[in-house]
Amino acid sequence: MSAHFVHAPYQDGMEVIDSGIMEGILDGVGRYDPAAPTERDVARALGADRLTPDDFAALLSPAARPFLEAMAVRARAERRRHFGTAVSLFTPLYLSNHCRNRCVYCGFNAANRIRRAQLDLDSIDRELAAIAATGLQDVLLLTGESRSMSGVAYIGEAVKLAARRFALVGIEVYPLNTDEYAYLNACGADYTCVFQETYDPVRYLEVHAAGPKRVYPYRLEAQERALRGGMRSVAFAALLGLADFRKDAFATGLHAHLIQRAYPWAEISFSLPRLRPHVSNAAENAGDVHETELLQVMLAYRLFMPHAAITISSRERAGFRDHAVDLCATRMSAGVRVDIGGHGEAEKGDGQFEIADGRDVGAVHAAIVGRGLQPVYRDYIRT
């Protein structure tokens, strides 16, 4: 993988920044051969006080497979050292499934025949009220990627409604410019999630057939623009299985590492989505990522960036999620609905993918307590 590649051109209105971070990611991943590290490299990484990117690469490699138990022991110790027994709870609220992109792996694909819907502000407020009634104090607002249907002003009004009821408000929407992130931050948004899906620029164009999402660098630079716009926390992820999952996991970690160096005050978090069935089932899984591989990636993230939060998705089964929060994850969704509506009123539109863990807040709370951990509903007070 090279830093010099032909990407889809920036579209009108897209802000261009040139920090050099994209080049650093692509150069690093271009040199990474998952088959190169040896068991000796893995052992050295596990003995290091502070891991380098090369150590992180070793922990992601097939050579680390015999060391998973040792990785888990150290990861659990790091988790306890930096986060104690706390597990932060949140839920997503999907506002709209209208989308302009044609991503082959996504149920919101503009070419898919699904029930399209968008919540109006009254519906959003009712949904938020229903979520707040569960005790949750952290909500993540999501939309499909359509500026015409879900404009920044609409998202801003939704954020304002959420900020009245919740201590923490996140957004997972299409990439924005710095001034737009600043506006949503002023409305009450605290953090943002923009997932690169895959860092392989060739594969990226293959799976993003049309739409503004084809512009690889604009998406990759979203976290920087969000931080420049005042967001205090940014999340990183690749959709594991879309390309070589070890290279994508390495790129994700390297991206977060470089952002942390450039913006040392930023709060960093990882998510680990992997391909799930959806309405069109159009995605070709380029590399199966099973639970063992997924856990290896999670443990490697924890050891490489011990201060980073790690979210375990409801895409995964309940037993795996419960085990993951005991070892390395720190953030967990509960009472999840991926369709439009369904919390405080009837469903209005189809969901993005299938979930595996449909437990409500009470059931997730009980499972966390059963592990000797502490569910946390509020860990931040907005000033």
Image (cartoon, rainbow, N blue to C red):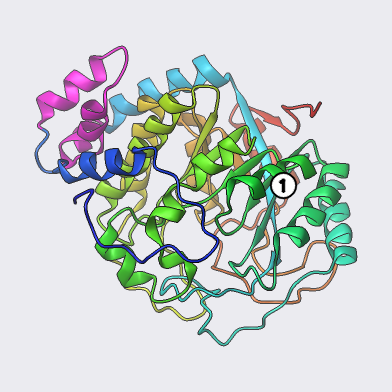
Q: In this rendering, is residue 48 above or below 235? A: above
Amino acid type of disc 1? Leu
Q: Quadrant of residue 25?
A: top left
Percent of width and height locating residue 158: 80, 56
Percent of width and height locating residue 178: 59, 45
Q: Is residue 133 left or right of residue 329?
A: right
Residue that label 1 marks? 184
Residue at the limit of the structure toward the front, as seen here:
12
Q: Residue at x 78, y 50 (%)?
A: 159
- Quadrant holding the C terminus: top right
Compare residues 163 and 176 and report the one nearer the observer: 176
Q: Which residues are magenta?
A: 38-67
Q: Is residue 133 left or right of residue 271?
A: right
Q: In this rendering, is residue 50 above or below 149? A: above
What secondary structure is marked by label 1? helix
Question: Callout 1: 10 Å neighbours few (<14), some, many (20+)?
Answer: many
Q: Main secondary structure of the magenta part?
A: helix
Percent of width and height locating residue 207: 35, 70
Compare residues 369 and 171 and report the one nearer the observer: 171
Q: Quick check: can you spot residue 287?
A: no
Q: Residue at x 20, y 39 (%)?
A: 61
Q: Is residue 61 magenta?
A: yes
Q: Is residue 305 magenta?
A: no
Q: Residue at x 76, y 68 (%)?
A: 341
Q: Is residue 195 left or right of residue 177?
A: left
Residue at the limit of the structure toward the top, as seen here:
49
